[in-house]
Amino acid sequence: MPVPNAPIPTLHRLLRSTLVCILLASTPVFAKPEPPLRIPLENFGFHPLPSQFLLNGSSMLTLHYVDDKHLLLTFVAHRLIPRLPDEPAEDQDRVVDALLLELPTGRTLARTSWHLHDHAQYLWNLGHGHFLLRVRDTLTTFAPLANVATRDPFAQHPFLVSAERRLAALILSPEADLLIIETVKRNPPKPRPKPPILGPDPEPASTELTERNPVQINFYRIHAGDDGGPVQARSAGAIQTPRAGDIPATTAGYLAVVDQGHQHWAFDFHSYAGKIAELSPFDSTCSPAPLFVSHSEFIAFGCRNGQTRQQLGGFNMRGEEMWEQGLFGDFIAPSIAYAPASGRFALSRVMLRTSAVADQPISSDEVSGQSVVVYQTGTGKQLLRADCSPVERAGQNFALSPNGLGLAVVHADAIEIYTLPPLTTKDESDLKLARSIAPPENNLPVQFTGQATASSTSTDADSITQPYIQPAPAAPAAANAPANLPPASNQPASANQTTTSNPAATPPPATPPAPASQSGDAPPEQHRTPPTLYTLPDDKAPTKPKDTPQ
């Protein structure tokens, strides 16, 4: 029996098949993950939070890994707020509950409450089970798992107090070994005029930073041990700039963006020893925004056309662009969680139904969801995608485990724990190579091209060449909107950065109040004062705003 000949494909069919192959190759294919472990939030007395605050940038719910088997959950609690004497009128007081949870049981091992006074970010993960807590302009540290056997697992250790300056931003490097604190001069609040007998209250005075109110940036090298003791911090220098923003820096150096013209850009790594390493070029129709994800790798957000950042690339310190891919859809408020030990990071984006004006309030009707994608840094492979709900513009409602094998998200009134695939042989090889090319760490002062050390009295602020500084956007002006907002557009922002623009009228105490009952670790001796911010002389402030040098 003759076998019929196969029909010759037409040009139209060939083109259609080619197009399908291209689309399949460019679309990430996620393996169906195993059903997540679910821990209902109602078990801990959690109540739904107002969406208007979550969408406008209030930090009201956080989730962090303490280690691979324990979580730290915090959320705003619905209870009476104690009154304080001489409390500033602009305070936005709230009570936040913090719980140490065991995995996979979800059992509560310890619990405490904090009285906070604004809506900005208040918690950072320092690694090794340590956390940094901000109450107004006072920073303390605690290690709940290391001290869980004591009567006060959340006992706080004094870390830093800013009595003369107020915190504008706090940035933590992905390896949690470099802390960048940005402050502005504290201006005493003007007396509020008496309102007229009839008519609305007068508008509050603006707290925006001005040319005459420069930002001081202090750098600290920090080390958190596994013993639960106080976090060690060493001052590493200070500079002044016209504005607050994110700085891509490590303990070895910082990144600078070089404009090569015709929408071609490049990155230079400046070590604090003065050496410059020329890294990979990057094509973008807007100035790219780089962020370190480990000591030896960084990512950069760019634009394919116009000024919308919808391009993402991965780079290493050998001058190679490892991968590049698009970020599809309109989004705001990107935030990142890091797991450098496994060469992974998680990127969260608040997805919109239509494009929105940057730094403006949004309503729930404009939001289609919050998406989190876990990437393998060396290859750009997308390992898992998960959704968060309620949508939180400030981020921190998701976390990546230190070993990079677990992703925790808040979704549908529960904590969901996803198991990520183990590292492949190639992943382990890439990770080993990345560690081998990391710039050597040093104890030199953090300084930028043309800048003397912070202690020098001859520093000319106008001659300082700054690193790339991603500006922190202004807060949206909207009714009932919080005064302090993190970066809120589709501009990249470090997951460990916050803006704290709410001024404090009275200086905070030098040390936190002692708990009612003490056991376990002894409180710090009274003669041991916490480190304070090194203040540059007033004559070192920039006399005029400067554009970000390229």
Image: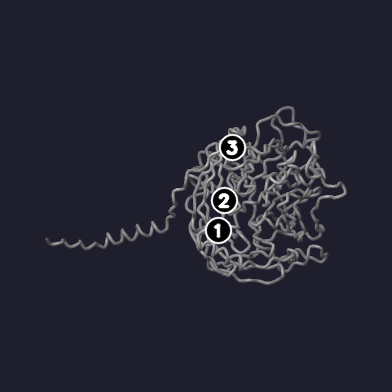
Question: Count of labels shown?
Answer: 3
**Taking 69 as reference, is 273 above or below it?**
below
Residue occupied by mark 1: 301
For residue 85, which quarter of the picture?
top right
Q: Amino acid at mark 1?
A: Phe
Instruction: State which mark lies toward you, 2 or 3.
Output: 2
Residue occupied by mark 3: 52
- Give me the C-alpha separation between circle 2 and circle 3: 18 Å
Check whether the beta carbons of the residues at disc 1 and disc 2 lie within 8 A of each other.
yes
- At a point 57% along the width and 57% down the height, the residue shown is 342
Give the image location of residue 176, x and y in percent. Answer: 67, 55
Residue occupied by mark 2: 334
In-front residue for pair 291/293:
293
Quick one: label 3, few (<14), some, or many (20+) residues within 10 Å? some
For residue 135, which quarter of the picture?
top right
Is 495 situated left or right of 325 in this image? right
